[in-house]
Structure formats: C-alpha cells, structure tokens
Image (cartoon, rainbow, N blue to C red):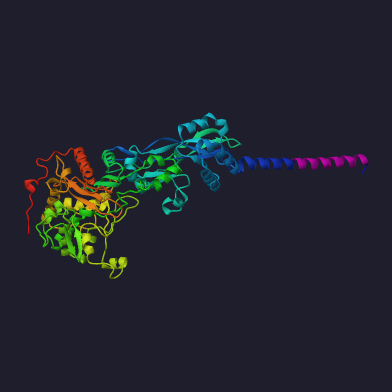
C-alpha cells in the first residue's frame, strides 16, 4: 500500500472512533436527561418540595361547653403560638437562646424543648402557647432576626366564670410524656393540648377536634419565604360542643356567698332528672391561669397551700355526716320495724346517756326531755338516736348501710370521685383494732354520724333525693345526656309511702317550726325541708352540714352543703343559710309560684299515719 493511502485509511478509522465516542456520550446524556425528567422526575420533585416546604399544625378548636341556659362555661378566643421550624440541633438551640428572654424560657424549659426537637426533628417546635400580644409584636417587628419563627393562630381556652367553675370544669394543658404512654392518648403527639381535670378531661374525646395542616415555603437557609396556607382537605375540624345541667349564674352565686376564708363545698341536684345544677368547692383557683402553661411558682403555691385549693371537696372529700345521718338511721329503723314515727325510748334525754360505763352526751347539755322520732329529728336529739342504734343493733346497721349505696361512689361523670366510708362488718373492726380491741359502743357514735363514718356531699344528696321523691334516684350527672339520664342507682329506699312522707314532714319541722335546728333559715315563699349536722373532728371546730330539698312536697332541687369548722360553739351554723339561699335563688330562677302557706303540708296530700 502506498504511503498516502495508509494515512487516509487511518484518518477514516479515527473519524469513526470519534463519531462512536460522541454518539455514546450523547446517548449517556440523553439517558440521564430521560431519567431525570421522566423516570425519576416525580421523586426529585417530591424531594425538592420537601426541601422547600414545611408543615405547621393548625390546632382544632375544642368544643364549647354550655350551661343549661346556653351560657358559655368554656369557650375559645383567638390566641397565638410561636414555633421554630425544623433544622439542625445547633440552629434550634440558637433560636431558643434568642427567644429565651422575651418568652421567659427557664433553663429547664429550654432543655425540655431541645429534647423534644431531637425526638421529632422533622416537626415544627412549639416554643410558646398562648403568646401575648407584646411577644408576637416583638417577633414581627424584628422579623429579619427571627426568620425561622412561625406565628400561628391557635384557639385559646377561656373560662368566663373563672374560679367559680374551676373544680367543675377542670383545665387544659400540654400533654406530657406519661400521658402519651397511655392507650387513650395513642393518637396524640407531644405539644398537643388535652383536658387535664374536670369535665375537660372527662369528655376529652368529645371536646377535642382534629388538627389540620398548613404549609410554609422556606429557602436554602431555612428562612420563611411565603405562607402557602391550608389545603381545604387538610383543614382542622372543631370538637363537639357539650351541654350541661349546671346553672352558671347559680354556680357564680354560690361562689359569691360562700363564707369568706372558709373551706367546704356545695352540690345541688334536680331530683327528677339527676342533673347537677351546682357543684362548687372552696377555696378555688382560676383555671384561666393554666392556659398556655402555668408558671411554676403559681403551681407550687397552689399545690402546697394548706387550704388545698386544688382539692375538689364536692366530689373528692368525705366528712363525718353528723346529724344529717339521723335520717339514714330513721329509714333503717322503719325498714326493719324497730322504729315508727311515734316511737319513744325508755330513757328521756337529760343531756347524756350512759352505755358500758361511759357517758355519751347530747349537744344540749340540759337535755331535750321525752321525745318521739319526729321531735327527735326536729330538735336533733343525740340521746334519742343513741337508743335507736341500740334497738337496731350493730350487725343490722352494718348490713343495711351498704344497701343505701354509702360504701360506693355516686357515679358522677368526673374523672375521679371518692366513695363513702363505713364499716362493712365486725371483721372490719377486728382488722382495724384487733380482736378485743373495740367495744359494742361503736354503735353509739355511728348512730349520730360520727365514728368510722365519712360521706361525700354527692352521696348524702343522693340519699335525700330518694327521701324527697320516693323514687329510685338517677345517678347525678353533669352532662345533659339521654343515656346518663336513664342510669339509676342499684338501691331503693324500700319504705312504705306513708313512712317516707312522715320523714319528710319531720324534715319540714326542722326548718319551719320553732325549735327546729334550721328555723332561722326558712324560706318566705316555699317550704324547705332538711336536716342540719354538726360533725365533730379532731382538727378544730366542728364542721357545719345541711342537706335538704324544696319545695318539700314537690321537690325541684336537692342541696348538700358543708363548711369545714363552720359551727363553732355558741355560733350559728354557716352551712344552713348558704344552702337556703341557693335553694331560694334556684326556685326564683325557675319562676315557681309561691306557696299559699309555706311550711305546711298541703291538705290534699295529708299523710295517713299507720302504726304507732
């Protein structure tokens, strides 16, 4: 081959190699472009969106809680949260440092927020719930310095009546780690608000709504570029409203007239429906202070206060019932046939009664003289009821008390309730004091509502509701609910109607006849029936009780009130006028016509007395 031909062939081969290499390169580029734009386009677009979009939770409004007349007991008002967008841990720490002074973040709170951020690194970190207007304005005025801070609107809980409804309504707060571990909060996440006590907790599943989601766009530095808003299908859904049998005005009235500086509570129930009209405990606190997190010093002061303002004395306390218990003794004695309305005892009241070589005193030192049952109830004679207990006998008494539900809780729709205390058998005494460590004389104290006997306001109100109506009581309930309105207790008074009416007449005498222990608190327009009680206790002056109902012969309200240490010697009982005024206000609110002759049984309903 000539030299020129060989060089030409080599050039042609090199040209083919170059063309092939170029074709291969173009094919590779085209393949990559195809993969990027078509095959993997959706995945990369999603990654791009994830890099530039951040989700912000839109809290759902809780359901509004209304009283029996449609007034708001718990409502929502506009509020604001301050949150930090997700980012590196050091960035979150720096953001918290910048916010610490203005938002009053303690070192403990800052550490808690950092821990939460590390546990949920892809979620916005709520730094301050219920931020004040000044705090929000501070952020917005310095927006370049707080580009990662999101101001989000959050419905804020508000209790218009404040302290008057604290123990009834409870309060809301941020869910904690212990609560997150419970099965009932399986769908909740850190940072959400839940009901912590009272009705807010009891009806959490009904009141809580479903949170929504909103999007914000951020740049490469994580700073907010724009707010993209909420997609319609991702919007929040408000919780369901809750309607109560409570009369908010009467609840506030009870708060306003409760003896200043004293402790105690009041419960009022509609005996026809079981609806609780008033449930009040004193001293109280302002549940609005818990919104957005209660300051630690305030929480400590409430928790450690000697008067225990956080204790719901209407449902979580039990007291010796004192002489209000004498109606329980009367009902048991009539049921067993040991007593009638006209029963006299062997010993007249001379101020005390000796039993097993020990004197048991009456509250009236010079005595009441010779009395039958109706008079003994009217004048609250201890000596008469000591002998009633002896007639009934310890074994029968221990058995019968349980039949009236005094060993159980009332079943009210609150998260917790204390049951009553009463010995169930002689074995209880043996266990407490040892065999031979106690005497039959325990019957004496039990008979007048003392000794090993402690009852709640709710249980006493429930027993008096049975006396007032002659029917099996409906369990007391706060929410207006058809199912709750059908739940009756599993016990009955089990008395003939004429005997029940005799006991009602005796309770009318307590309030409406001279010599009755509540005569000074009778009503001018309606007949109030009830029983006073003075409960001795080892911690100071006696407690003051009153349990009653009105109108006596057509009851619309049953009330139970206690004022701790509210009946010192030679001083009026504080619980009696408190209860009387609440009853009077309620009957006025109902628009009930005045009775023609208050304090007297209507002729058409006169009792037929059987037995002697």
Magenta span: 3-22
Relative to 435, 151 lies left or right: right
Q: Is residue 494 visible?
A: no
Q: Residue 511's x, y, as percent?
A: 15, 46
Callout count: 0
Image: 261 above or below 456: above
Depth order, front residue of 161/350: 350
The quarter holding residue 67 reads top left
The residue lying furthest to the right in this view is: 2
The picture places residue 146, in percent across and down from the top left corner, at: 56, 34
Extreme residue in the top direction:
141
Give the residue drawn at x 12%, y 41%: 595
Q: Is residue 53 visible?
A: yes
View extreme (front): residue? 366
Vertical arrangement, residue 145 with respect to residue 564, above or below: above
Quadrant in the picture for the C terminus:
bottom left
Q: Residue at x 23, y 60 (%)?
A: 446
Along the line of sight, the residue nearer the viewer: 257 or 39: 257
State the image coordinates of residue 217 (x, y, percent, origin top left): 55, 35
**Point 53% across, 29% down: residue:** 141
Residue 435 in magenta stretch = no
Residue 10 within the magenta-colored segment of the rendering: yes
């Amino acid at each position: 081959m000539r030299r020129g031909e060989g060089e030409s062939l080599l050039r042609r081969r090199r040209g083919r190699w170059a063309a092939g290499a170029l074709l291969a390169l173009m094919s590779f580029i085209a393949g990559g472009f195809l993969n990027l734009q078509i095959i993997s386009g959706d995945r990369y677009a999603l990654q791009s969106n994830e890099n530039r979009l951040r989700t912000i939770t839109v809290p759902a409004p809780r359901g509004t809680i209304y009283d029996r007349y449609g007034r708001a007991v718990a409502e929502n008002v506009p509020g604001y949260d301050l949150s930090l967008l997700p980012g590196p841990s050091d960035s979150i720490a720096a953001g918290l440092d910048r916010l610490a002074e203005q938002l009053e973040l303690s070192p403990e709170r800052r550490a808690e927020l950092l821990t939460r951020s590390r546990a949920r690194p892809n979620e916005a970190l709520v730094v301050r719930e219920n931020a004040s207007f000044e705090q929000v304005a501070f952020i917005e005025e310095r927006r370049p310095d707080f580009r990662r801070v999101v101001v989000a609107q959050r419905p804020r809980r508000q209790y218009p009546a404040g302290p008057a409804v604290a123990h009834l309504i409870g309060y809301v707060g941020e869910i904690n780690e212990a609560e997150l571990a419970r099965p009932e909060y399986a769908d909740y996440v850190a940072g959400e608000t839940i009901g912590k006590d009272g009705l807010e907790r009891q009806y959490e599943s009904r009141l809580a709504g479903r949170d929504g989601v909103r999007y914000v766009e951020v740049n490469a530095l994580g700073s907010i570029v724009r707010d993209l808003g909420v997609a319609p299908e991702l919007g929040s859904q408000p919780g369901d409203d809750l309607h109560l049998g409570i009369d908010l005005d009467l609840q506030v009235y009870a708060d306003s007239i409760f003896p200043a500086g004293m402790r105690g509570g009041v419960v009022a129930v509609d005996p026809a429906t079981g609806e609780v009209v008033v449930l009040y405990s004193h001293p109280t606190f302002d549940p609005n202070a818990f919104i957005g997190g209660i300051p630690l010093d305030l929480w400590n002061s409430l928790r450690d206060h000697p008067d225990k303002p956080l204790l719901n004395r209407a449902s979580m306390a039990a007291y010796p019932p004192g002489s209000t218990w004498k109606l329980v003794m009367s009902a048991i004695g009539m049921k067993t046939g040991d007593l009638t309305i006209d029963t006299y005892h062997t010993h007249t009241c001379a101020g005390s009664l000796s039993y097993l070589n020990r004197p048991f005193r009456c509250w009236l030192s010079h005595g009441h003289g010779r009395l039958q049952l109706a008079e003994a109830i009217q004048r609250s004679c201890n000596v008469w009821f000591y002998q009633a207990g002896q007639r009934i006998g310890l074994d029968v008494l221990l058995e019968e008390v349980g039949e009236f539900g005094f060993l159980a809780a009332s079943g009210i729709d609150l998260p917790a309730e204390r049951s009553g205390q009463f010995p169930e058998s002689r074995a209880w005494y043996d266990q407490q004091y040892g065999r031979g460590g106690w005497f039959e004389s325990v019957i004496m104290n039990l008979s007048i509502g003392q000794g090993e006997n402690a009852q709640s306001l709710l249980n006493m109100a429930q027993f008096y509701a049975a006396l007032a109506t002659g029917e099996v009581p409906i369990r007391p309930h706060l929410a207006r609910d058809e199912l709750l309105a059908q739940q009756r207790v599993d016990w009955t008074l089990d008395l003939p109607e004429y005997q029940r009416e005799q006991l009602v007449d005796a309770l009318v005498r307590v309030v409406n006849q001279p010599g009755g222990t509540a005569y000074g608190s009778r009503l001018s327009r309606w007949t109030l029936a009830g029983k006073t009680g003075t409960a001795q206790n080892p911690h100071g002056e006696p407690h003051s009780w009153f349990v009653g109902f009105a109108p006596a012969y057509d009851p619309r309200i049953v009330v139970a009130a206690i004022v701790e240490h509210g009946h010192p010697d030679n001083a009026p009982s504080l619980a009696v006028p408190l209860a009387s005024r609440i009853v009077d206000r309620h009957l006025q609110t109902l628009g009930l016509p005045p009775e023609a002759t208050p304090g007297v049984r209507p002729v058409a309903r006169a009792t037929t007395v059987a037995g002697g």
